[in-house]
Image (cartoon, rainbow, N blue to C red):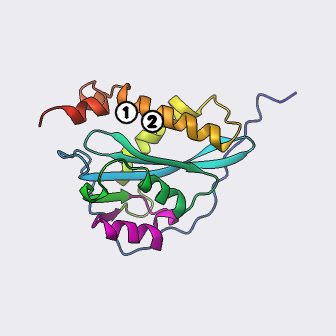
Amino acid sequence: MVSNYTVAQYKPHKDVPNEAEIGNALQREFDQDEPFAVVVSDLTYVRVDAKWNYVCLFVDLFNREIIGHSCGANKTAQLVFEAIASVSGRLDRIEMFHTDRGSEFDNKLISEALETFEIERSLSNKGCPYDNAVAEATFKIFKTEFIKQRHFKNLQQLRLELDDYVHWYNHHRIHGTLGYRTPVETRRLPS
């Protein structure tokens, strides 16, 4: 027997924030007119079997499309790098990459990838989730539609179902902010 009142809770680790001198170049300009002008990212936790695992999503501000994603057992720069590697399309089209100040984004691996493709970096102000509001809102939707009331037996199951969810989100889920179109429909509209 398991109590209905005892629910596994996520216990956040005390991460040291990213203290980089990089400023908030995005300045909450969440409406973008061009694809890949600005990509935002964040991570969230997901219960896999009896342990916490993590998901990283990359969201294009132009059409709110999830253009890259990854999942793994650890909240590291490698997880972010795998999301970068999953982006289909030319990375040199991305003009700006905006995140919060999580330590997983402050890493030589990430910095080198961004420098290689000449992508400008932008970081939210310390302790201000509103500076990354689109990523936060996307994760709220993600948790409600995908994570809650589900049990993933292993990381492979999470990967497969995450791929399916991202496809559904981009091709079938309509968004009020996009005039009740899907992200892919919005991208294909003539400019």
Identify the residue under disc 1: 170
Q: Which residues are magenta?
A: 99-122
Q: Secondary structure at mark 1?
A: helix
Occupied quadrant, residue 184: top left
Q: Which quadrant of the figure contains the N terminus?
A: top right
Mark 1, Cα crowd under 10 Å, few <14 / some 14-19 / many 20+, is many
Taking the image as drawn, is residue 23 in sight?
no
Task: Kindly check if marks 1 and 2 are in contact, taking CB atoms under 8 A apart as contact.
Answer: yes
Residue at the spot 62% in from the left edge and 57% down from the top edge: 74
Task: Let me know if residue 119 is in the magenta part.
Answer: yes
Residue type at mark 2: give it: Val
Percent x, y of residue 155: 65, 44
Percent x, y of residue 116: 33, 69
Residue nearest the observer in this picture, 24 or 182: 182
Residue at the spot 29% in from the left edge and 53% down from the top edge: 90
Residue type at mark 1: give it: Asn
Question: What's the mark number on residue 1?
Answer: none
Q: Is residue 185 left or right of residue 50?
A: left
Occupied quadrant, residue 119: bottom left
Identify the residue under disc 2: 166
Q: Is residue 35 left or right of residue 10?
A: left
Residue nearest the observer in this picture, 32 or 19: 32
Percent x, y of residue 39: 32, 52
Q: Secondary structure at mark 2?
A: helix
Q: Which quadrant of the figure contains the C terminus?
A: top left
Task: Let me know if residue 77 is in the magenta part.
Answer: no
Percent x, y of residue 171: 36, 29
